[in-house]
Amino acid sequence: MQNFGITNPVVEQYIERLLPQRHPVLAEMEAYGYDQGFPIVGPLVGQFFAQVAVLSGAMRILELGSGFGYSAFWFAWATGPDVEIHCTEGDPDNAARAKEYLRRAKLDHKVTYHIGDALTLLRDEIEGDFDLIFCDIDKWEYPAALQAALPRLREGGVLLWDNVLWSGKVAAKSEDEWTTAIQQFNTAAMGEARLRAHILPIRDGVLFAIKEAAPKKGRPAKT
Ligand SMILES: C[S@@+](CC[C@H](N)C(=O)[O-])C[C@H]1O[C@@H](n2cnc3c(N)ncnc32)[C@H](O)[C@@H]1O
């Protein structure tokens, strides 16, 4: 198990042992990710994402930074047959690997992989609004990704953002480009009038937000 030091690893391992057995293909992906040191969200976050997808009734889901499909698998596996999942990934080898895993689990019909830079794809190629947007691209891009994602999230939709605690490094002053970008993103997202946001300290920190309706005149956006 990968641990980034937010929660006591013994506690994480305890919760992980309580999780139901994973689909065999998902278990295989998990083993591959850990073996390769590939930063997948892991089962604690995956299970949470699956619950959020079901609870929100999301029909169109967008992932920014999909890797070899581990997090997309959780969304695809948890949701109904008519749910569309759009993945974005810069590395075509990761996309090919994802497609093969999803095909084997008979989930590939729900998932479209877009290959290239996630924010460019979102601007130029991927159409429509989304009910749920999950971001896990390179961390220096987080502030720009928030600006790109917000207008494409429908009112009442859900934002999920991974690694927002960055091994706890965000809590101290930093000169590191990725850490400062995450700090900037956290400040912007938590202070954004259109979002009701919170940071959950699971694994490496997940920002969970709901997009509110545009405030009516005379009523504060948040109560
Ligand atoms: C942390 S991994 C994603 C893991 C995946 N969400 C999961 O949990 O299974 C980040 C992935 O995003 C890709 N990536 C990073 N920045 C990107 C960008 N700007 N556009 C497209 N892909 C990007 C990387 O190639 C990598 O595969």
Image (cartoon, helix red, strand yellow):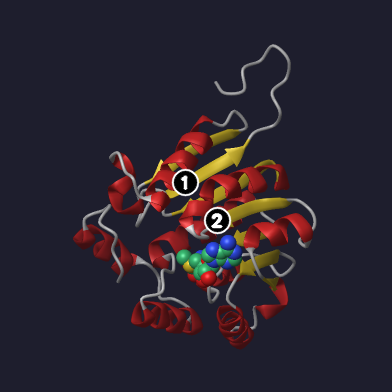
Q: Which residue is mark 2?
A: 135
Q: Is residue 28 left or right of residue 123?
A: left
Q: Is residue 213 above or below residue 151?
A: above
Q: Position of residue 83 (x, y in %)?
A: 71, 64
**Image spot of residue 101 (x, y percent):** 56, 84
- Identity of the residue furthest to the top in this view: 218
Quadrant where the N terminus sits is bottom left
- Mark 2 CB within 8 Å of ligand 1: no
In percent of the image, x 56 and y 72: which residue is there?
73
**Amino acid beneath label 1:** Leu
Is residue 187 among the parts visible in the rendering?
Answer: yes
Q: Is residue 187 or residue 15 the one in the foreground?
A: 187
Q: How many numbered markers are drawn?
A: 2
Residue 79 appears at what percent x and percent y?
A: 63, 64
> Which residue: 71% across, 62% down?
121
- Amino acid at circle 2: Cys
Q: Secondary structure at mark 2?
A: strand
Left or right: where 121 falls relative to 170: right
Q: Which mark is residue 216?
A: none
**Residue matched to label 1:** 207
What residue is at 40 percent from the left and 44 percent from the top? 180
Quadrant in which residue 41 is drawn: bottom left
